[in-house]
């Protein structure tokens, strides 16, 4: 069974840092691009970042550029999101999602269950 | 404000047909990028519903269908059931943003 499990969420003060992890299983992790997507409480989905299978191509939403860093370890079947200089508006459930299809024509399947990040003093 | 525009809510009685629109622009849907749809049941993660404009993953009932024309796309649900009550999101790619984009989401209420 293809599965993604996020961890690392929690409560952090504004300006603080947090590192999210996503453990993948049931598929050849090193063959797929991976993404982070977030959802603020009661709001819609927002794409955050993507990383290609070999980490050669990395992209960020403007809202997190310069503060967040996506990375992966194919040997450990794991995806990461290092979040620095956190702001209240970063409060959200963060989902990792496998990217399927060709570049620019791809979709997300499956999604993990999400991990909640709360930025508050 | 989302790059892709969806109606905030739609509703229908059991057995009826509803459609959800997703309007983009020349840098995303209008540029030829595919549209994909997700269903998010209350308290759960999004689930792929339609990919590549009109394709259903295995296990998705044929009551769900998708289409795309010009700078817009639509999701149609026929034979509405109570279990269809959820939030629905469209997704595509935007060349000017160099990343994926989502619609603001549409809440479907089954009356």
Image (tube, coloured by chain):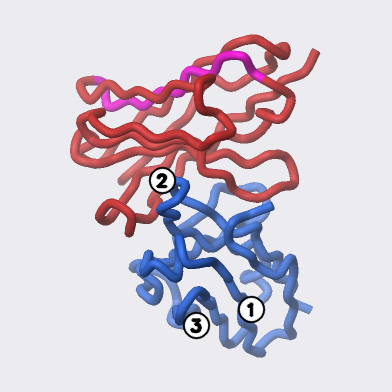
Chain colours: A red, B blue
Report the disc number at residue A33: none
* Residue A82 magenta: yes
Spot occupied by residue B2 in the image (x, y as percentages of width and height): 63, 54
Q: Secondary structure at mark 3?
A: loop
**Comparing marks 2 and 1, which lies closer to the viewer?**
2
Residue placed at 50% from the left, 16% from the top? Answer: A19
Vertical relation: B84 (above or below) A89 = below
Q: Residue, x 49% and y 78% (percent of image)?
A: B64
What is the spatial separation of the Cα atoms under label 2 and label 1, in whole angstroms? Answer: 37 Å
Q: Secondary structure at mark 1?
A: loop
CB-based contact (under 8 Å), mark 1 and mark 3: yes
Reading the image, the residue beneath label 1 is B81
Quarter of the figure with residue B11: bottom right
The furthest residue to the bottom: B16
Image position of B97 (left or right of A74): right
> What is the spatial separation of the Cα atoms under label 3 and label 2, in whole angstroms?
33 Å
Q: Is residue A18 left or right of residue A91?
A: left
**Residue A4 appears in the rendering:** no
Where are the magenta residues, as a range?
Answer: A76-86
């Amino acid at each position: 069974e293809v599965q993604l499990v996020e961890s690392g969420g929690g409560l952090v003060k504004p300006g603080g840092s947090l590192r999210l992890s996503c453990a993948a299983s049931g598929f050849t992790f090193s063959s797929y691009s991976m993404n982070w997507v977030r959802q603020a409480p009661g709001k819609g989905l927002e794409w955050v970042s993507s990383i290609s299978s070999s980490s050669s191509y990395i992209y960020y939403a403007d809202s997190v550029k310069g503060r967040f860093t996506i990375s992966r370890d194919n040997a450990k079947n794991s995806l990461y999101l290092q979040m620095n200089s956190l702001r209240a508006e970063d409060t959200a459930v963060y989902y990792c999602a496998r990217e399927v299809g060709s570049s620019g024509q791809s979709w997300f399947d499956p999604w993990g269950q999400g991990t909640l990040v709360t930025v508050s003093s | 404000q989302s790059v892709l525009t969806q109606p905030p809510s739609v509703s229908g009685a059991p057995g009826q047909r509803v459609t959800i629109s997703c309007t983009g622009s020349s840098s995303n849907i209008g540029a030829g990028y595919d549209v994909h749809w997700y269903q998010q049941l209350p308290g759960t993660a999004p689930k792929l519903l339609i990919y590549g404009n009109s394709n259903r993953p295995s296990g998705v009932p044929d009551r769900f269908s998708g289409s795309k024309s010009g700078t817009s796309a639509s999701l149609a649900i026929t034979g509405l059931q109570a279990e269809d009550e959820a939030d629905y999101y469209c997704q595509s790619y935007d060349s000017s943003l160099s990343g994926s984009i989502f619609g603001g989401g549409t809440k479907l209420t089954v009356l």
